[in-house]
Image (spheres, rainbow, N blue to C red):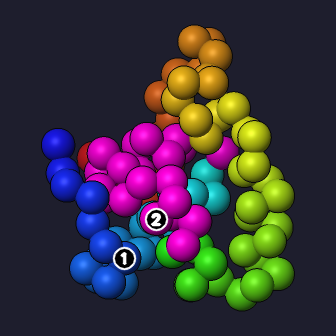
Amino acid sequence: MKMKKQITELDLADIDRIVQMAWEDRTTFDAIKIQFGVDESGVIALMRKHMKRSSFELWRKRVTGRQTKHKALRSDDVTRFKCEDQRG
């Protein structure tokens, strides 16, 4: 398992992918942590830094309390989702 990364250690491609994954309803914060080593608070900080304030506020409103963003709260009926842009 990857160690927790600092946002400054990520390249632009990783940041773009994390932002994309964070916007996806079915991608959990756990999945982002496994792939990039960035936990939920790191994702929030990254989104705050790399988005316009209004976009960040819209995103925070959408994901706050959303069950599909937290694996532990997720229903067993929700299966893995793979975006078309995600690598094989």
Would you say 74 lies left or right of 88 here? right
Would you say 2 lies left or right of 26 here? left
| Number of numbered markers | 2
Residue position for label 2: 42
Would you say 52 lies left or right of 13 here? right
Residue at (64% x, 16% y) in the render:
75
Residue type (three-letter) at the residue carrying disc 2: Gly
Which element is circle 1 on?
helix
Percent position (x, y) of residue 78? 60, 21
The residue segment tinted magenta is 25-45
Q: Is residue 20 above or below residue 80?
A: below
Residue at (61% x, 23% y) in the render:
74
Residue 3, quarter of the rendered image? bottom left
Can I make out residue 84 in this image?
A: no
Dot 2 alpha-carbon crowd within 10 angstroms: few under 14, some 14 to 19, many 20 or more: some
Percent position (x, y) of residue 7? 36, 76
Residue at (75% x, 49% y) in the render:
64
Q: Could you tell me which quadrant the N terminus lies in? A: top left
Which element is circle 2 on?
helix
CB atoms of marks 2 and 1 within 8 Å: yes
Residue 80 shown in magenta: no
Residue 76, quarter of the rendered image? top right
Residue position for label 1: 7
